[in-house]
Amino acid sequence: MSEQTALEKQLLGRFAELDEKALLIAPMRHGAHAGKVATDYKRAVAGRAFRFDELDGWIKKGWLLEDESGVIRQRRGANVTLVGKMKKRFERLIKQENGDRAMIIDHVIHYSADFHDSDKSSLAQLFHQLRLKELPTGAWVHADGRDFQKKE
C-alpha cells in the first residue's frame, strides 16, 4: 500500500499535528486568525471521524454520493423516504460534512504558501479522488465527468 503524502493526509483529516516549527511560523505569516483556523481544523477532523461510519453507510446504501466537487450530495433518483427527526438528521449530516470538508480545505490553504483561495476547486477535486479510493465497491460516486454510478 502506498504511503499518502502530507497534503493527502491533511485533506482527509488524518494529518498529524503540524510540527512545532510550522506552528511557530504560521501565526507570524497569518496573524491572530491562525489559532482559530487550527482549532476549527481540529473540530472538523473530529466531526468527520465521528460521522464516518454513518456517512459511508448512506453512501453504500445509495442515498448519498461523493460528488466530483468534493462534497456529498443526496443522490438524485434515490428513493429516500425519511421523515421527521430522521430526515432532519440526514440533512444535518450532509450540511455538517460539507462544512467540515470546506474547513479542512481552508486550513490547507491557510497553512501552505503553495495554495491560495483560487486553489479551492482543485483541492476539492483532489479530496474527491482520495475519497474514491477509500470507498467500498458499490458506493455511489460521481467521477470522470460521467453520470452518477456505482464504484466498481
Image (cartoon, rainbow, N blue to C red):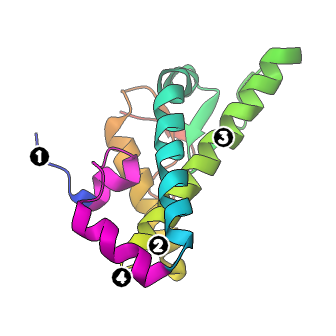
Q: Which structural element holds mark 4?
A: loop
> Could you tell me how far apart the alpha carbons at marks 2 and 4 are, in whole angstroms?
8 Å
Marks 2 and 1 in Cβ contact (< 8 Å): no
> Could you tell me how far apart the alpha carbons at marks 1 and 4 are, in whole angstroms?
26 Å
Mark earlier in primary sequence (2, 3): 3
Question: Does residue 29 show up magenta in the picture?
Answer: yes
Frontmost residue, 13 versus 131 = 13
Q: Is residue 90 left or right of residue 121?
A: right
Which residue does the numbered mark 2 point to in the structure image? Answer: 110
Marks 4 and 3 in Cβ contact (< 8 Å): no
Q: Badge 2, how many Cα within 10 Å: few under 14, some, many 20+?
A: many
Marks 3 and 1 in Cβ contact (< 8 Å): no
Q: Position of residue 136 (x, y in %)?
A: 36, 27
Which residue does the numbered mark 1 point to in the structure image? Answer: 2
Tell me the tag on residue 113: 4
Q: Badge 1, how many Cα within 10 Å: few under 14, some, many 20+?
A: few
Seen at 35% across and 82% down, the residue is 113
Query: Can see residue 41?
Result: yes
